[in-house]
Amino acid sequence: METRTASPIPADAAPAHLRPIRSGDQAGAEGAQHVLRDPRRSDVDEWGRSEHMRSIARRIYDPLYRHWFRAEWEGLEKIPATGGALLVANHAGAIPSDAPVIMHGIEEELGRPVYGMADYFFRTVPVVGTLWSRTGGVPAHPDNAYRILHDQQQLALVFPEGAKGPSKTYSDRYRLRRFGRGGFVEIAMRSGVPVVPLAVVGAEESMPVLFRLPSVAKALGVPYFPVTANLLMFGPLVGPVAYFPAKFKIRVLDPVRFDVLDSQERYSKSRVMDEAERIRSRIQDALHDMLRERRSVWFG
């Protein structure tokens, strides 16, 4: 396993929206004066992400990543060092622990920002919505993904299982749900970027769902309302945010590239569905392989 440490991003290699920018106040008052900013400490970008807030979040989260989840990566070098790429992973845990582990690991090890695409519901939750945006969360809409991947040549992370992934019970752990209608494949084709599949082991055990309460979810207007082992063990105050120390392993699979013209209005639906199913099967096979090799949930 290859371990990499983060390195500063040179100013001339930074994405366009993170390069030296014009100060709005000085541009209006003084005309054409430019202000240089550290590309990893810029203010809030057009998506609501704050590099300063993200750096704080990484410092706070790093002990959990390294000492609680003890995350290990395999094949990290398969993630492109430059250019856009769509990261696609399995999804699990009542309050998913996989997204922050993946985003943190790539930003720390490769020094590249990652935008996490998720349901617009998260944007509407008070406080949580703002924090989510400031740390790289973006509503999962095709137009947003296209701009991030094609126009800005950044990394975007999606979970095609959607809410079906983290809401599944422990008895169904590591059994991937259907990858929707293959929308992630179509946006990768349109953006002209590869899909990089990730197989994640550990999230299922970090916050296992024992059963769901559909009537409570409907009353609260949320996608699902899980009752977890964490909730029963730690109580209603700590349980919703206390993860078990499951060992995380993330395997990066070979990128999938599509021999099609980008920026087209439509793509063959059958081709899109077939490609999505192939990617789902590759992740599922990798998970089976990783689980066979795992000696312990807690020690890997």
Image: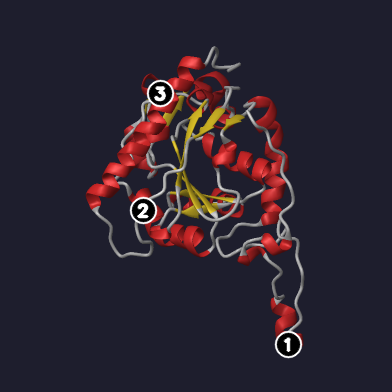
Query: Within 10 angstroms of label 2, few (less than 14), some, or many (20 or more) residues?
Result: few
Does 24 sit above or below residue 223? below
Query: Which disc number belongs to residue 163?
Result: none
Distance, label 1 to label 3, CA atoms, is: 59 Å
Q: Residue furthest top?
A: 295
Name the residue beneath numbered marker 3: 173
Looking at the image, residue 190 sits to the left or right of residue 132; the answer is left
What residue do we see at 51% from left, 24% from top? 231
Looking at the image, residue 191 sits to the left or right of residue 57; the answer is left
Name the residue beneath numbered marker 2: 259
- Marks 1 and 2 close (CB-CB < 8 Å): no
Amino acid type assigned to the residue bearing label 2 in the image? Asp
Task: Single out the mark in the foreground, 1 or 2.
Answer: 2
Amino acid type assigned to the residue bearing label 3 in the image? Arg
Q: Quadrant of residue 42?
A: bottom right
Does the rendering let one see residue 225?
no
Query: Measured from the top left, where is residue 73 in percent x and y?
Result: 59, 31
Looking at the image, residue 287 sits to the left or right of residue 248; the answer is left
Distance, label 1 to label 2, CA atoms, is: 46 Å
Distance, label 3 to label 2, CA atoms, is: 34 Å
Amino acid type assigned to the residue bearing label 1 in the image? Gly
Does 36 sit above or below residue 119? below
Q: Quadrant of the C terminus?
A: top right
Question: Element at badge 2?
Answer: loop
Question: Element at badge 3?
Answer: loop
Query: Which disc number belongs to residue 31?
Result: 1
Query: Measured from the top left, where is residue 110 in percent x and y?
Result: 65, 44
Query: Within 10 angstroms of label 3, few (less than 14), some, or many (20 or more) residues?
Result: some
Q: Earlier in the sequence, mark 1 or mark 3?
A: 1
